[in-house]
Image (spheres, rainbow, N blue to C red):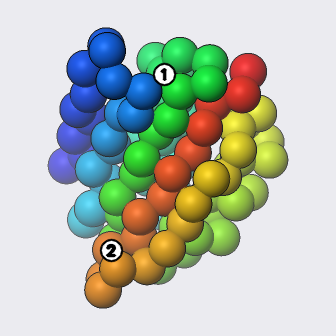
């Protein structure tokens, strides 16, 4: 199950989407990004193998910047900055 954590005084929100299959990590990120301030960041942890390419496409469509995406073992660590 995905978890969102973060404090209002932090510039980065964490979405733990590990264990979710496509398209759920993207859908949860889309919902979570609405609660991130413009200029703020959403870090997504996912185990879905399509995450790296899916999030690149998602950022182009969602008005966000893909700041970082990397694989750490079986987890994909993705950092998205909200632009609009």
Mark 2 secondary-structure assignment: strand
Q: With respect to residue 60, does 6 lie above or below? A: above
State the image quarter where residue 48 is shown.
Answer: bottom left
Picture coordinates of residue 51, whole percent (x, y):
52, 67
Mark 2 crowd level (few <14, some 14–19, many ≥20, 10 Å Cα)? some
Q: Earlier in the sequence, mark 1 or mark 2?
A: 1
Label of residue 75 in the image: 2
User: x and y percent of residue 73 in the render?
Assistant: 30, 86
Disc number placed over residue 84 in the picture, else none: none
Q: Residue at x 19, y 49 (%)?
A: 1
The residue drawn where x is 63% and y is 30% is 82
Q: Report the side of 76 relative to 63 (left or right).
A: left
Question: Is 81 located above or below residue 44 in the figure?
Answer: above
What residue is drawn where x is 49% and y is 58%?
78
Q: Which residue is mark 1?
A: 36
Q: Is residue 13 left or right of residue 63?
A: left
């Amino acid at each position: 199950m995905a978890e969102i954590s973060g404090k209002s005084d932090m510039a980065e929100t964490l979405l733990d989407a590990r264990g979710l299959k496509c398209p759920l990590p993207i859908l949860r990120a889309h919902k979570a990004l609405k609660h991130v301030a413009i200029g703020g960041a959403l870090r997504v942890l996912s185990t879905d193998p399509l995450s790296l390419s899916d999030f690149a496409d998602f950022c182009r469509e969602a008005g966000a910047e893909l700041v970082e995406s990397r694989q750490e073992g079986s987890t994909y660590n993705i950092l998205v900055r909200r632009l609009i």
